[in-house]
Image (cartoon, rainbow, N blue to C red):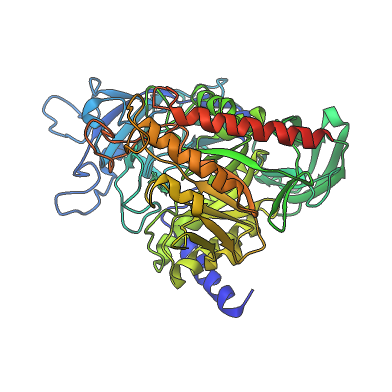
Amino acid sequence: MSISQSLRLAFFALAGAALWGQPIGTIQNPSGRQSLSLNGPWQILIDPYEAGYYDFHLNPIRDGGLGAGREPAGKSDKFELAFLPNTPTLQVPGDWNTQRPDLLWYEGTIWYRRTFDAPAGAPAGAAAHPGNRQFLWFGAANYQAIVFLNGKKLGQHEGGFTPLQFEVTGQLREHGNALIVKVDDRRYPDAVPPTMTDWWNYGGLTRDVKLLDMPATFIQDYFVQLEKGSRNRVAGWVRLDGAGQRQRVTVSIPEAGASATVATDDNGYATFAFPANLTLWSPESPKLYQVSLAAGTDRVSESIGFRSIQTAGSKILLNGNPVFLRGVSMHGEAPFRAGRVFSEADARILLGWAKELGCNFVRLAHYPHDEAMTRLADQMGLLVWSEVPVYWAVQWENPATYAKAEHMLAENIARDKNRTSIVLWSVANETPLSEPRTKFLSSLAAKVRQLDPTRLVTAATLPHTVENTTTIDDPLGQYLDVLGLNEYVGWYDGAPAKADAMQFRTTYDKPLVMSEFGAEAPFGNHGDEDTAWTEEYQANVYRHQLPMLQRIPFLSGMSAWALVDFRCPRRFLTGIQDYYNRKGLLSDRGEKKEAWFLLRDFYGAMGAAAGAVAKR
Ligand code: GCU
């Protein structure tokens, strides 16, 4: 690393540390812990002027305003910043946009309030287990959240797609705890993503909320995977949180008869490595093992698969064998009801369709999806491209923006580092060439390698095309393991037949994944194949794209844009788009367009050929 790079990283790290209201380090695997679910109806107050937080001179209200949870004290009390028994509710988890028609377009602040009891003996009950610690955990809150408990401000978080949590030990009452969250989903120029995106800005408490009950010293975080470059050794680390951090920790994989016991250091940290005879995970056989960690009174376990992922020249190697990524891209948007995905049921529909399409790979665009999605991809055998919303026109020279991006990346990796299915961490999508941009993104790439040296780093770049030749020469490529390219030959770039003459060259001896290609057509809109917006035109684009992609010698994967039509505020062609991006192979009601069958058959043949090779 050059001097200037280390200086720049130190500068960004400093900026990072100053980031607004840091929550505590991520608690790994919250769904495997003792907890009280706080999902359900929450009271809400819509506050476009943020009058619940700022006074009329825009000074923050000293006691937190609505966050203080004060109630009118009597009939003559004119106090107005209050939730009342008849205050309306919305469901959590859930975006607010699809729960009420008047909120579909709403961008601003909404206050959420939920009361709950934590009686002794109840999971996570106050004084439930003397000495235990309690944490409030939110799967996500889009975009900025300020959290109050019993009138006290716990902290804040920025970023709409990664968890936030706060320790509340000693702050809980047996009965009538008031949890209030100010959620602001407005778009800001210095934010990540910035103000212009191509997806719906769903706001709210969009994922599960839990009260976690942890032993005084608990297993806060761990990383368990195959040792880099090996097939039969497991390696990783574990971190304890609490007074008794110097402890013995046992990591075991009972089904494989493998385990190791290690002692943590003064910071509660220990690494481990031990031999294990394992069936490796792959899309064809997504073998998962129950992995358990035990330290003192704490135990946690979860299903983890073991596989290695590397590159060799322009090949991607899964468990040492070349693999071609047959993929599709998707948003975290639930089909039929629209709105943000927040459950395994939602995820199962989307990933089930990807499987039906013949995919062994999905690109989860353009932000960390709900954990249910990546856990299900582990089970269903789908390789995953995971991305942070460093998308289009980000403020590359703004240290605060860099700090936000780096923090979201760290939170994403922290949450999903044990997800076998994830093989690619993407640091950006379609970002304009400039030196500050490449500096920004190369720092993010370095951060990925620091946090997780076991996976591949990528980004979706824009084509550098002159007439019929596209050259893969984005300077960012030198910092990536795999190049991603979004090309729209036949849609934004020329007529479908242009693909027949296209040439692709690369300046890198690295794999290319065509991370986006496609065309738009609402389901049921028919005409001849030269008529734009018809299924026939969309299919014709695919008919020319697929042979073009097959001609690219260094192509190791592809993900069509997109699996399903999705809501988008910048797509307003009346009677055609109606605020949906119609590049789905399926309508938002799961109806199959003509292009679906083309790609399904193409992947079917490819999968069969790959299967035949694997058998040999
Ligand atoms: C881009 C972008 C997507 C967008 C797509 C489109 O490539 O990455 O987010 O939806 O193009 O234009 O449909």
Q: How many numbered marks are there?
A: 0
In the displayed structure image, the side of residue 292 where residue 178 appears, left or right = left
Q: Residue at x 45, y 66 (%)?
A: 437
Q: Is residue 588 visible?
A: yes
Q: Does residue 507 appear left or right of residue 268 in this picture?
A: left
Image coordinates for residue 568, horizontal then vertical, percent: 32, 39
Is 420 or 602 nearer to us in this picture?
Answer: 602
Question: Is residue 166 something one can see in this rendering?
Answer: no
Q: Which of 13 and 57 lies nearest the eye of the viewer?
A: 13
Residue drawn 50% across the image and 54% down it: 501
Decide: is 465 above or below 525: below
Which quadrant of the rendered structure holds the N terminus? Answer: bottom right
Q: State which quadrant residue 355 falls in.
A: top right
Q: Residue at x 22, y 38 (%)?
A: 47
- Horizontal and vertical percent for residue 451? 64, 55
Residue 307: image x %, image y %?
75, 41
Q: Nearer the viewer, residue 400 or 515?
A: 515
Please tell me which residue lies in front, 34 or 195: 195
Above or below for 255 versus 442: above
Q: Quadrant of the C terminus?
A: top right
